[in-house]
Amino acid sequence: MAALMAFLALSATGRTSWAQATTPPLRQISPDVFQLGQVRLDKAHRTIQFPALLIMNDGLIEYLLVNSKGKTYESLLKTDADPYHIQLAMLLLGANGAPQTPALLSAPSVPFHVNRPAGDTNAPPPLAITGDPISIELAWPAAGGQKRARAEDCLINLNTKTNASRGSWTFNGSRVVRGTFIAQREGQIVALIDDIDAMVNNPRDGHDNDQIWQINSNALPPLKTAVEVTFQLEKKEK
């Protein structure tokens, strides 16, 4: 709740560049379901859903999901959903991202890659990207009904020669730097390699290597297929 209030307070003060845009009202669809722009929030199932488009189905990628401002040339999916609305919907579910510490706010935006120049010390060291665990599911129309797939099943880890290991993703929530919500400005939503400006990061081994995440073409529909993306906030272990 503290993170939500702080995020809303920034918007209310007008200090954020993204707050100048018209924000649609949170509309109630049913007792537990709400709509915010293109994002649908289901409190009972702890999920948010929004539309996307499959823009790559082959090759290496660094992002699972971006919007038109993001790196569409190395992302599996693109969405027109507003990152601010995605962030707000996650906070309304009770998700907690990475604490906005001085170290986080002063860190460089460039992701830390394994294939850096020889002799590069990669200083300052990469930050541990923290936040609540979520699952990511993709769905699209198929013969006989809707096809569903975990996001991990759509990726191949070239180090292990297998699908990306099944498990959670980290909702770190991007950063708010000098009154600007960076995910809104840069358009990076779900990163496969370390990116503190993306809203969600990949916690698997190889998360700092931009040369191992390959699209699993066999698990995906044709290019330009409309895809529904679901983030589910996982329950915390007691």
Image (tube, rainbow, N blue to C red):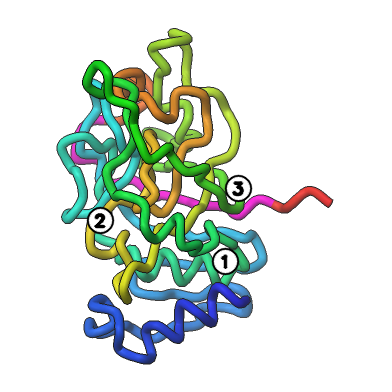
Q: Nearer the viewer, residue 12 or 15?
A: 15
**Residue 24, x across and y down, in percent:** 33, 83
Secondary structure of residue under mark 3:
strand
Residue 228: within the magenta?
A: yes
Q: Amino acid at mark 3?
A: Pro
Q: In this rendering, is residue 162 above or below 133? A: above
Location of mark 1 (residue): 42
Residue 100: within the magenta?
A: no
Q: Quadrant of the N terminus?
A: bottom right
Can the viewer see residue 191 in this picture?
yes
Secondary structure of residue under mark 2:
loop
Secondary structure of residue under mark 1:
strand
**Horizontal arrangement in the rendering, residue 238 relative to residue 66 (left or right):** right
**Residue 71, x across and y down, in percent:** 19, 44
Mark 2, other Cα within 10 Å: few <14 / some 14–19 / many ≥20: many
Q: Bounds of the magenta span?
A: 222-234
Q: Amino acid at mark 1?
A: Asp
CA distance for labels 2 and 3: 21 Å
Q: Residue furthest right?
A: 238
Location of mark 3 (residue): 133
**Residue 47, x across and y down, in percent:** 56, 59
Q: Amino acid at mark 2?
A: Gly
Location of mark 2 (residue): 187
Task: Give the mark, 2 or 3, whose residue is nearer the N terminus.
Answer: 3
Predominant secondary structure, magenta span: strand
